[in-house]
Amino acid sequence: MDQASSLRKIVSEKASDVVKNRVLKSSDVVIGGVTANYPRVMAITSGKGGVGKTNIAGNLAIAFSMLGSKVFILDADLGLANIDIIFGLHSKYNLNHVIKGEKELSEILVEGPYGIKIIPGGSGFSDIANLTEGQKLNLLSEFETLDDEIDILIIDTGAGISSNVLYFNLVAEECIIVTTLEPTAITDAYAMIKVMSTKHNMKYFKLLVNNVSCVKEAKLVYVTLCKVIDKFLNDVIIEYIGFIPSDQKLKKAVLNRKPVLEMFPDTCSSKGFTEIASVLASSPRRYEADGNLKFFLNRFINFGLIKE
Ligand SMILES: Nc1ncnc2c1ncn2[C@@H]1O[C@H](COP(=O)(O)OP(=O)(O)O)[C@@H](O)[C@H]1O
Ligand SMILES: [Mg+2]
């Protein structure tokens, strides 16, 4: 067995041990289907910008919706609030208006295709740490009104290891790291995993490889990342969840301000999104069933900004 395949084997054994251990833990309620009646919160993140996070968030949202889930997207990229761009939507208000008490959460929601609802973050997240207690409570109770309406909340984060991005990754139930084949994207993905594991004790990540030509290329990215992680970081598990092929039709859809899964449902990247959604849908949950969204929100509101 060559070095790469032995590494792959170790990593996949480690990952399945974690799953086994989790299944055995009495505090864990493991539910495979996305139709579980409590919200699942997933952050889509990356070390480097422009690797495809927003397209992944938007298209996975559609794929989950096609599987019968009620999906919300939280557009939390402060730099470029762009989920509305790929959906061709315009949002007049954002979370800042809710924080200031000028709008209710239900009034800022933007309706996307397939019943997806988008929560525009705008500049609302720039200063979470400085919110007053009253503002925090208000935000919390606004989010709680949505508890029954959400099966899956997808957070489209910004790139890099700024405190805001780390914040979302830490409070979400699962953190999906996106990288491409580019060495800088892989290095930056590693940098993000390093900070989250060494400074914030987060040890479990999912990896989605975007914009590659084939599964072999995607696995090469995975193995490259695993090798560095194994060498330099303790107890970090990174689970490969799949890849999205390079697809000119995806670019064409972006130019048309439509998600590719809506515009070209049969193209290769659309099939990739559908496959990854079903992989995620059938993967075990990490936390107890009780009040998942509440769990997320409490952490979200109470954490304060994370020191880098
Ligand atoms: N699978 C893919 N195939 C072809 N082009 C892609 C793919 N994924 C992303 N792109 C290109 O990369 C650009 C940036 O994607 P985007 O989702 O906005 O990245 P991010 O949110 O990480 O900044 C897209 O506009 C598209 O042109
Ligand atoms: Mg983006």
Image (cartoon, helix red, strand yellow):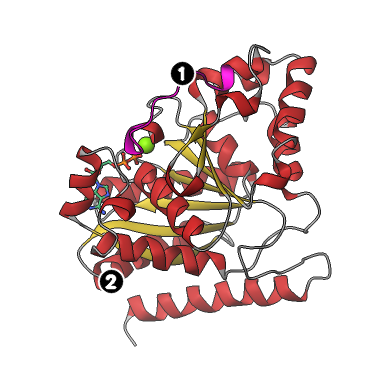
Classify residue 9 by image quadrant: bottom left
Give the label on residue 215, or none.
2
Left or right: residue 207 compared with residue 233: left
SS type, badge 1:
loop
Q: Spatial distance from mark 2 to mark 1, Cα to Cα?
A: 41 Å
SS type, badge 2:
helix
Q: Earlier in the sequence, mark 2 or mark 1?
A: 1
Left or right: residue 23 compared with residue 276: right
Give the label on residue 92, or none.
1
Give the label on residue 126, or none.
none
Name the dominant secondary structure of the magenta segment.
Answer: loop
Q: Furthest-bottom residue in view? A: 1
| Neighbourhood count class around disc 1 (C-alpha, 10 Å): few under 14, some 14–19, many 20 upward | few
Q: Amino acid at mark 2?
A: Val
In reply to whether residue 65 is colored magenta, the answer given is: no
Which residues lie in the magenta part? Answer: 85-96
Residue 227 appears anywhere in the view: no
